[in-house]
Image (tube, helix red, strand yellow):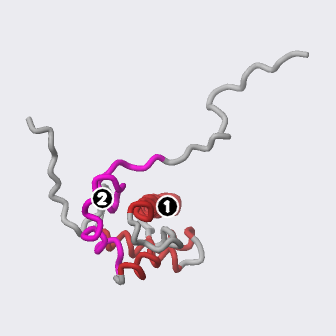
Amino acid sequence: MGHTTFSLLPDCLAARLSGTLLEVEVVLNKVQDSPSQEAAANEIRDDIGFIGALRWIRHRIFLTQVALNMLIGLLPSLPKNCTPKISHFQYFFNVQFVLPGIREHIASYLQVLPPPIGFGPYPKKKKNRFQHKMGTDPPQKEG
């Protein structure tokens, strides 16, 4: 009747991802400290295979970077040279772990921020505009 949904998600849990925000940030830190995402995928997840682990990692990286990019635009108090990296937000908020502690600072923006930080919609990935359409090739022009 009121057309309102209330969330009882504790601050420590990641929105629309399994696990906690701390676990997401630990994965991001391991990827940052690894020589490549592929090396991190071999180390972090071995239960779903290499390709699955790589997708799992990249999904978390993408969502977190989009959310941090949005925060850079929403928070005028952030420095102008701030980039969507965990280390910059650690320095600015003076915390060891950004994602678990950031929700109290940005409570008014949770409805628009994407998961895992906020409760907004999933961001759309840009499609490759040069990708050809699926299906058979068009008929060749004679002449």
104 left or right of 53 in image:
left
Q: Nearer the viewer, residue 66 or 56?
A: 66
Q: Label 1, on which residue?
A: 58
| Point 19% across, 65% down: residue | 10
Where is residue 129? Give x, y as percent: 63, 40
- Outermost residue toward the top in this view: 142
Q: State yes or no: residue 19 in magenta.
A: no
Give, as a three-letter code, the residue at label 1.
Arg
Q: Is residue 27 above or below residue 51?
A: below
| Point 36% across, 55% down: residue | 114
Across the whole image, how many numbered discs are drawn on residues?
Answer: 2
Give the main secondary structure, helix, strand or loop, of the magenta stretch. loop
Q: Label 2, on which residue?
A: 109
For the magenta stretch, what is the residue range? 97-124
Q: Secondary structure at mark 2?
A: helix
Give, as a three-letter code, the residue at label 2.
Tyr
Picture quarter containing residue 37?
bottom right
Q: Is residue 27 above or below residue 119?
A: below
- Outermost residue toward the right in this view: 143
- Outermost residue toward the front in this view: 76
Where is residue 61? Give x, y as percent: 47, 64
Q: Nearer the viewer, residue 53 or 74?
A: 74
Q: Is residue 68 above or below residue 132?
A: below
Where is residue 19? Give x, y as percent: 29, 65
Where is residue 143? Give x, y as percent: 91, 16
